[in-house]
Image (tube, rainbow, N blue to C red):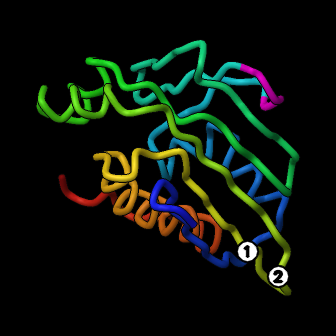
Amino acid sequence: MGSDTFVYTTYIRTTPDELWKALTDPVFTRRYWGVAFETEWTPGAPMVWDEGGRRTEDPEQVVLAAEPGRLLAYTWHSFTPAWAEAVRLGHDVYERLARERRSKATFLIEPSGDTVKLTVTHDELEPDGLMKDMIGEGWPALLSSLKSLLETGEELPEPPR
C-alpha cells in the first residue's frame, strides 16, 4: 500500500450480518464510536455524522459502496469548526486538517471459520498529513471497542483525552 493508505485487520467472533449491523446501525455505532450515521446506505447517498447532537453534513460526504455483510465504503467526514471545538482541537490543528484532501474508509467483511475477518482501509490520505497520524491511533482503538462490543456485549471505556 502507498503512503496515502492505512490498513488494519482484525478477527471478530461474530457473523457478517451482525458486523454489518454494528457498522451501520446507530444503536451500535453510538456505543463504540459515539457517532450515529444518518444515511440510506446506498451508493451515492449523503451521510450525516451525528456526534452527540452535533451534525456534520457536506454534499461530498457520501456512501461509496454498500453490500450488506460484505463491503461498506464512504468518504470521510468534513472538518468543521464545530467538530474541531467539540473534539478539543486547537485552531492551528483544525486549519491543517481542513486543508487536507477528503479521504475514504472501506470495510471489507469476510467469513473466516467461526469468526469474521474485518479489514479497514482508509486511503486517499495526504501522505504526510495530520489525518494519517490521527487515524493511526484512532482506528485500532475504535475497532478494539467494536470487537469487544460484539464479543462480550460491552464496548471498551473511552480512553482519556
Q: Which residue is mark 1?
A: 117
Rendered view: 53 above or below 148: above
Dot 1 or dot 2, earlier in sequence: 2
Cα separation between marks 1 and 2: 6 Å
As drawn, is 8 to the left or to the right of 43?
Answer: left
Marker disc for residue 90: none
Q: Mark 1: which amino acid?
A: Lys
Report x, y in % for residue 133: 31, 56
Residue name at image x 53 percent, y 45 percent: 124
As drawn, is 67 to the left or to the right of 8?
Answer: right
Residue stretch rendered in magenta on the structure: 41-45
Q: Nearer the viewer, residue 92 or 15?
A: 92
Q: Mark 2: which amino acid?
A: Ser
Q: Are marks 1 and 2 in contact (CB under 8 Å)?
A: yes
Q: Nearer the viewer, residue 137 or 99?
A: 99
Rendered view: 144 above or below 68: below
Report x, y in % for residue 103: 52, 39
Report x, y in % for residue 142: 46, 59
> In which quarter of the view is residue 117 placed?
bottom right
Q: Nearer the viewer, residue 50 or 149?
A: 50
Report x, y in % for residue 45: 75, 21
The residue carrying pointer 1 sits among few (fewer than 14), some (14 to 19) or many (20 or more) residues within 10 Å by Cα, namely many
As drawn, is 128 to the left or to the right of 143?
Answer: left
Residue name at image x 39 percent, y 52 percent: 127
The residue carrying pointer 2 sits among few (fewer than 14), some (14 to 19) or many (20 or more) residues within 10 Å by Cα, namely some
Q: Which residue is mark 2?
A: 112
SS under mark 2: strand
Residue name at image x 49 percent, y 53 percent: 32
